[in-house]
Image: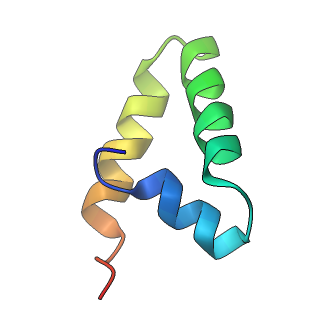
Amino acid sequence: MLAGICGGLANYLEVDPTVVRLIFALATFFTVLFPGVLIYLIMWIVVPKEN
């Protein structure tokens, strides 16, 4: 919800944003936080803003 990464990804994949957020949160938690947070930050920088 910070940068809209999961919401935008859910929109692109045409699935519920809650599902994407839950999967991302679980994946981040089970990989000891760092890779998930790093991926989120990179995507925040790389993914273009919605018009």
Q: How is the image coloured?
A: rainbow
**Horizontal arrangement in the rendering, residue 24 relative to residue 47 (left or right):** right
Residue 7 locus on image (x, y percent) = 50, 58
Quick check: 5 left or right of 22?
left
Task: Classify residue 48 as left or right of residue 15.
Answer: left
| Identity of the residue drawn at 43% across and 43% down | 39
In front: 32, or 20?
Answer: 20
Q: Nearer the viewer, residue 18 or 38?
A: 18
Is 32 located above or below residue 48 in the figure? above
Q: In this view, does 45 lie above or below 24?
A: below
Residue 13 x %, y %: 71, 69
Image quadrant of residue 5?
Answer: bottom left
Residue at point 49%, 66% (across, down): 8
Q: x, y percentage for residue 10?
A: 62, 61
Left or right, residue 39 beside residue 46: right
Q: Nearer the viewer, residue 47 or 2?
A: 2
User: For residue 19, which quarter of the picture?
Assistant: top right
- Would you place residue 10 above or below residue 1 in this image? below
Q: Position of residue 24 (x, y in %)?
A: 59, 35
Image point 64% across, 26% down: which residue?
27
Q: Quadrant of the N terminus?
A: top left
In the picture, the quarter occupied by the C terminus is bottom left
Q: Nearer the viewer, residue 50 or 35?
A: 50
Question: In the rendered picture of this protein, how many numbered marks are placed on residues?
Answer: 0
